[in-house]
Amino acid sequence: MADPYQNNYYHQGRGDAYGTYGEGGGQDGYGYQADYPAQEEDAASDATEGHDEEDQMYEGEYQGIPHPDETKASQRAARTKSRGGASAASELQELSEQYENIMEDCGHGKFQWTLFMVLGLALMADGVECFVVAFVLPSAEKDLCLSNAEKGTLGLVVFLSMMVGAFLWGGLADKLGRKKCLVVALAINCVFAFLSSFAQGYGFFLFFRLLSGIGIGGTIPIVYTYFAEFLQMDKRGEHLSWLCMFWMMGGIYASFTAWGIIPRYGWGFSMGTEFQFHSWRVFVLVAALPAIASLVGLTFMPESPRFLLENAKHDEAWMILKQVHDTNWRAKGQPEKVFTVTHIKAPKTAEDEFIEIQAATGTPVQRWAVRSLTLCKLVLKNVASLLSVELRFATLYMAILWFCMAFSYYGLSVWFPDMIKHLQYEEYEARVKVFHKERVENFHFNFSLENQIHKEGEYIRDKFINIEMISVKFEDSLFEDCHFENIRSTDTVFENCTIRSTVFTNTDLWEERFIDCKLENTTFEHNKHGCHLDIKEENDVLIYLVSFLGSLAVLPGNIISALFMEKIGRVKIIGGSMLISAGCTFLLFLTFSQSAIIALQCLFCGVSVAAWNGIEVVTVELYPASKRATAFGVLNALCKLAAVLGSSIFASFVGITKAVPILLSFVALVGGGLVALRLPDTREKILL
């Protein structure tokens, strides 16, 4: 039999913004034919090969149950009627309805679930990226000798680079393609994450994490846009919500692998003094595995046919839609189902065609420069169109929602563990031992000193050998004829002390540890230097446990929001979840213990994820295909900016007052919840 695809052609109507793909007529440019090539009318079968379904009795006929085809036809007629009151529906609306009809015929099955897993791994990679730096810092700061300012800069750069990535890749995905941009973004993330694990200096590590963040920043805008364009209307909200679970899985994966790898800090190898490879670097490599797996899976996935139709690539779109149809129906045991689409309306895209300089009039570099400049102009034009008359209110409402939610969520995500650390520090300080005016002569200190303050003491001919000093402070004390040997210390200082005829051998007590001290005839021999000598151990188990519990608490909220996204509606889920989350933050005024803060963090994460799911679904549904990824990218970039502001502001109040962070998050969540009520209900809205 001849290739049926060869009988199709693309015809562009005069004066129309849309053309028709394929042969034959049919309502809304959406036609069926019984078999390929076209048969005589009296010989046509019912879109099957090998048998005639009309000869079989529909088993639900006697129960009065409508045939699925009748239900589908009535739904399409209702959609046509609802928008057809006006004399002429917009060309975009016609294409959208036609595409929705095609996706309904393709069904939801094996293809969507395969794509779900591949894109889920990309989303998981984004979730991991948000935790990587926080988990490696306690160990990396020793290898890289990071100051507090450098640690803060590193954490800030991650979110800022993801913000740039979201804006950049979101805009490009509407012009170059969803799959193409996602592949490049993930590849950039994988390459520079790999390089960062081997970086020996702070500058290179910062630079590689910056580029890695720019890559992974494009995943969220593209993943949701890409997946939504393979979903039919009644499946969209639920399955986009299920997709959100992978972000939670990223947090769990990062917490679990970090706990299993990083505490083994003693493991590693070195090549001289210039190259060291410790366990935290292994974690950085393992953290990139979801991105690598997604990148491999994407090589087997097609481009979004909706994007291809927007760019007049009708042949490719038709083939992909046929692939989706055949894959799903074969997996359901109905290989005889034939893809019956013969023609598709599609918009002209002349204004989006890149300007090319002919070979005779310019060099390859010049042509590349013109294409790049044109692409930048088209992306910026698309961004500006988000504030057009038709979209400005939607953009404003969504910007407020994204900002308020991110400001509270990321701010509290930093504040919760910092607050727990502060409570632990206060508890530790409360147990400090104070020694006042003690006089110790000819004594051998062969035991470790921890959490002590010695004031106005006198130490004559004493020996401090082979011991550790942890959080020890000597104030206004005298050391005479003493001997310090093989000392390892952290947070240990000598302030306003007099030190005479004393020898320091093989210790890490260098000049910075002696504040306003008088050193008389004092000798330092074979002093040890380097930030990696610090013996202080961060409470790693707590860091990983809090992150793990917070990520795990998202699971019930994710399940509930997915199951009820279509039944309750996006608006009610967003508004209700944000208001309940505000109530959770207000309860923080009543808590004074670590366990209560952890419990409220879990409750907050579990409730707020439903709002996140609703916001992401609505963002996909409010914008047309030509602007969907761009809008998602801009809003996600705003989200990352809010995350930077929230985490910085909330962290600055730790140890000062908890009232300000609580009130700020409460006001933001209540305000966002009220704004959510102004959003349109997009449950039964066809993707434009």
Image (spheres, rainbow, N blue to C red):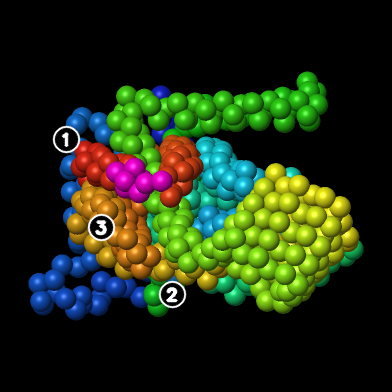
Q: Are marks 1 and 2 in contact (CB under 8 Å)?
A: no
What span is colored magenta in the figure?
A: 656-663
The residue pinned by badge 1 equals 85
Q: Residue at x 29, y 60 (%)?
A: 591
Mark 3–mark 2 distance (CA, rounded to whole Å): 55 Å
* Rendering coords of residue 179 (x, y %): 56, 51
- Side of 90 where 9 appears, left or right: right
Q: Residue at x 49, y 61 (%)?
A: 429
- Side of 347 where 46 appears, left or right: left
The residue pinned by badge 3 equals 590
Q: Residue 331, which numbered label?
A: 2
Mark 1–mark 2 distance (CA, rounded to whole Å): 40 Å
Element marked by disc 3: helix
Sequence order check, earlier mark of 1 and 3:
1
Viewer-side residue, 45 vs 543: 543
* Rendering coords of residue 479 (x, y %): 74, 59
Q: Residue at x 78, y 67 (%)?
A: 461
Element marked by disc 2: helix
Q: Main secondary structure of the magenta part?
A: helix
